[in-house]
Amino acid sequence: MASSVGSWARRNRYLLARRCVQLGVLLAFYGTLHWGWSVFGEPLLAGNLSGSTLLGTIPLADPFALLQILMTGHVPLLEIFVGAAIVLGVYGLVGGRSFCAWVCPVNIVTDAGEGLRQRLQVKSGFRLPRHIRYVVFGLSLLLSALLGVAAFEWVSPIGILHREVIYGIGFGLAMLVGILIFDATVLRHGWCGHLCPLGAFWAQVGRVAQVRVAFVEASCTECGDCLKVCPEPQVLNLKAAARAGMVRSGECTNCARCIAACPEGSLAFALRARIRSVPPIRPGAAAPP
Amino acid sequence: MSTYTGRREFLKRMAQGAGVATTGGLLWSFLLGQQRHARANMLRPPGALNEPDFAATCIKCGQCVQACPYGTLSLSPSGAEVPIGTPSFSPRDVPCYMCVDIPCMQACPTGALEHDLERIEDARMGVATIDHESCLSWQGLRCEICYRECPVRNDAITVENRPRRTSGHALFVPVVHASHCTGCGICEYVCPTEVAAIHVLPPELVQGKIGDHYLLSNDAEVDADGGPSASPAGDHDAVPGLEYLNEGER
């Protein structure tokens, strides 16, 4: 019994780690506001995902929210630029859409939607091209400029969920239930995988991200287990991944489902710089110059 | 996605894409228009920019809410009568106690709460208005609680003597002076009537504007209030029409 729990935990180690980070970030915000959590007398993490202050001194801000504010023609204080730059730098290192899989609270909702979908055995009927998120991203900026308010921030389920958990519940949780049902019954991976403009923003940052999923073609048996669990299967183009030695697309969320699913251990996290230096090994085939 | 089969298919897809974007954009704009509606008596924290600029600049992070030591401010949840995720306060619940260091404003990372407010007494969150018909002082009682609790009493609220006919004693009624009222709402909070007889409302909802072309008498009080006589006084050339009227005098 104990060993089966242990093996379950090992198989789901990345899932557990992601949930810990997601809930931990939420708890840090919540605890700072409601229980006065502090370190050396400074509030631990004041604010929410849109903008916050770490340890009373380090500003953090959502660069996409800043971008929308700038599109309205307003220039905010320097503090928010510094905060956005720090956040941009961090996700530039750990992988743009790592935000989506490791921090964003809506990910828990959409994962639940996917779980529900599998339990109900819903057939996928409705389809939408994945790149529609870039249309939504463009619309966010266009509407911000036209209407004079940060367009996505005013309807964002991410902001709503985070704010209403931290600052008090409102009608907004209905929107989250809506997303859950949409993902479960209408469009598979609908919100995170097709529509969210914040995901589109981080996908662009992810093109230069340092932490990537490395792929070793030599041990791959092409069983396809990774593709079955991947929420963004278009990024798992194994031929392209073999050439690059890694999953290159910024749309990869670094969720590590594929790493956990791969029976051969052909997929693993690695730094981009390291991956480049690994020569392609394939028994019987000549290595390219 | 299927492959494109010629120009016709390409154009069809482009038209579909444009259709989806336009429909989505219009629906989204409608939602944003709905979200911007606010109840008339919504009060923003001290130093807030005017409402359109505030709405554009506020990043909805709630750091002002956390900085307030009295729990005055709250972030609006969706579906409330205040634009989503933005801070406001209701003085009948918790008023603004006018901290001298204005921590809410200092906490704002975007400048939606403008950082150049130096004295909290210069804040203009709202203006108190009195309903004479439910104000106890106006009924002849010596209430005056609003006056006594006002943090800038004798400037923002004064008590004026209002003689009556021989049948009754004089009234002592509170009078609000908008030029000094910060809109903190302590008066509304302490008002003892069942529904407060003194309400703090956003200045633009209450205040009129005389207009620069009126030349009032050079009354010292008018000057002190920043009234319109302050600027044209001693500079009659600036008043339109005046030169023409005085031509014969020169």
Image (cartoon, coloured by chain):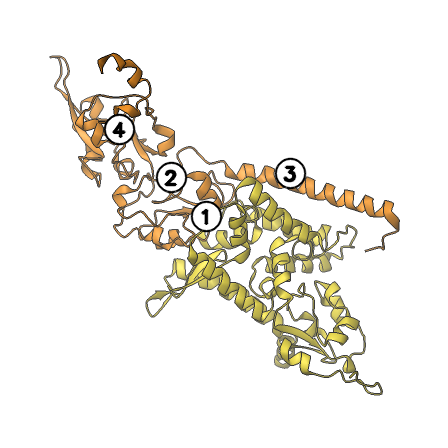
Residue A216 locus on image (x, y percent): 74, 80
Q: CA–CA distance between discs 2 and 1? A: 15 Å
Picture residue at 61% right of the left edge, 50% below the top: A177
Secondary structure at badge 3 equals helix
Of all chains, the one bearing label 2 is: B
Would you name the residue on which mark 4 appears? B227
Amino acid type of disc 1? Cys
Would you name the residue on which mark 1 appears? B58
Q: Is residue B216 left or right of residue A104?
A: left
Residue A212 locus on image (x, y percent): 65, 73
Of all chains, the one bearing label 3 is: B
Q: Is residue B37 left or right of residue B22?
A: left
Judge by depth and name the residue closer to the eye, A247 or B139. Answer: A247
Q: Which mark is residue B43?
A: 2
Confirm whether residue A271 shows in the render.
Answer: no
Would you name the residue on which mark 3 appears? B26
Marks 3/2 in contact by CB < 8 Å: the verdict is no
Marks 3/1 in contact by CB < 8 Å: the verdict is no
Q: CA–CA distance between discs 4 and 2? A: 25 Å
Q: CA–CA distance between discs 3 and 2? A: 30 Å
